[in-house]
Amino acid sequence: MNDVDPYGLPTFPGEDVLDGWVDHSEIQLRDVRVFTRGSLTATLISHPGVWDVIVSDGAGNVEFLVADVEDVAPTLYEVARRM
């Protein structure tokens, strides 16, 4: 099950050490997280046990993935390496 921060946003393991990613999440959108890293924007949508990961590179390339809760942070690093 996903942990929840004090504001009600879902969290995932490794989130606290996502170097270079900036969290733009809004408390009103409790199941959606938005992070940026350089020109990359990652939109994360929480579902029970998994997250949809949508990453755009700002140049028209978009990648859609589904990650288990414990794989969200590693998935973001892998996408950033590829894009």
Image (cartoon, rainbow, N blue to C red):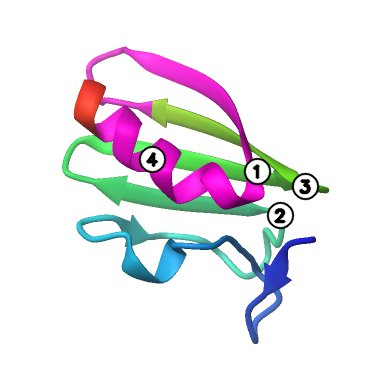
Q: Earlier in the sequence, mark 2 or mark 1?
A: 2
In the image, taking residue 36 as reference, residue 51 lies left or right, namely right
Q: Earlier in the sequence, mark 4 or mark 1?
A: 1
The reply to whether the C-beta atoms of the residues labelled 2 and 4 are less than 8 Å apart is no
Mark number, residue 76? 4
Residue at the limit of the structure toward the left, as seen here: 38
Mark number, residue 45? 1
Marks 2 and 4 sit apart, C-alpha to C-alpha, by: 17 Å
Q: Earlier in the sequence, mark 3 or mark 2?
A: 2
In the image, taking residue 48 as reference, residue 28 lies left or right, namely left
How far from the left and from the top, in percent, is residue 72?
Answer: 51, 45
Q: Which residues are magenta?
A: 56-80
Residue at the image position 19 percent from the left and 36 percent from the top: 39
Marks 3 and 1 sit apart, C-alpha to C-alpha, by: 11 Å
Q: Earlier in the sequence, mark 2 or mark 4?
A: 2
Residue at the limit of the structure toward the bottom, as seen here: 6
- Residue nearer the viewer, 37 or 11: 11
Mark number, residue 31? 2
Q: Secondary structure at mark 4?
A: helix
Marks 4 and 3 sit apart, C-alpha to C-alpha, by: 17 Å
- Residue nearer the viewer, 9 or 27: 9
Q: Quadrant of residue 27?
A: bottom right
In the image, taking residue 8 as reference, residue 54 lies left or right, namely left
For label 3, the residue is: 49
Q: Nearer the viewer, mark 3 or mark 2?
A: 3
Please say whether residue 83 is visible from this viewpoint. Answer: no
Residue at the image position 16 percent from the left and 43 percent from the top: 38
